[in-house]
Amino acid sequence: MTDHLSELDLDVALFEPPRDAIRAHLEGCGSCRDRLEALRAELDAFRAGDEPLRAARIVADKLAARGL
């Protein structure tokens, strides 16, 4: 595993229980924990409809970063 989790690992951790290696990394890496918490907050805002345009931009940016 690299120094930090990939965006894909973090995205998966939003919807599934993290695999042991990811869970262990999150326990020891405050930066990745903070990134995951920020993603959870964005997802919660998206689901609540609090900030639909901001949430849509976040999703579009993620898709663009993956070349989709």
Image (tube, rainbow, N blue to C red):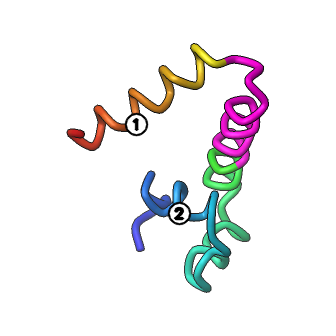
Q: CA distance from mark 1 to mark 2?
A: 13 Å
Amino acid type shown at disc 1: Lys
Q: Earlier in the sequence, mark 1 or mark 2?
A: 2
Q: Which mark is residue 46?
A: none
Q: Is 36 or 17 nearer to us in this picture?
A: 17
43, above or below 5, in the image: above
Residue 17 falls in image quadrant: bottom right
Residue at 27% x, 43% y: name it.
66
- In reply to whether residue 48 is colored magenta, the answer given is yes
Q: Which mark is residue 12?
A: 2
Residue 49 falls in image quadrant: top right
Label 1 element class: helix
Residue at 40% x, 27% y: name it.
60
- Residue 9, how many percent across, how many down? 48, 63
Q: Which residues are magenta?
A: 37-51
- Provide the major secondary structure of the magenta segment: helix
- In reply to whether residue 25 is colored magenta, the answer given is no
Which corner quadrant holds the C terminus?
A: top left
Amino acid type shown at disc 2: Val
Residue linked to disc 1 = 62
- Residue 36, how many percent across, how many down? 65, 50
Which corner quadrant holds the N terminus?
A: bottom left
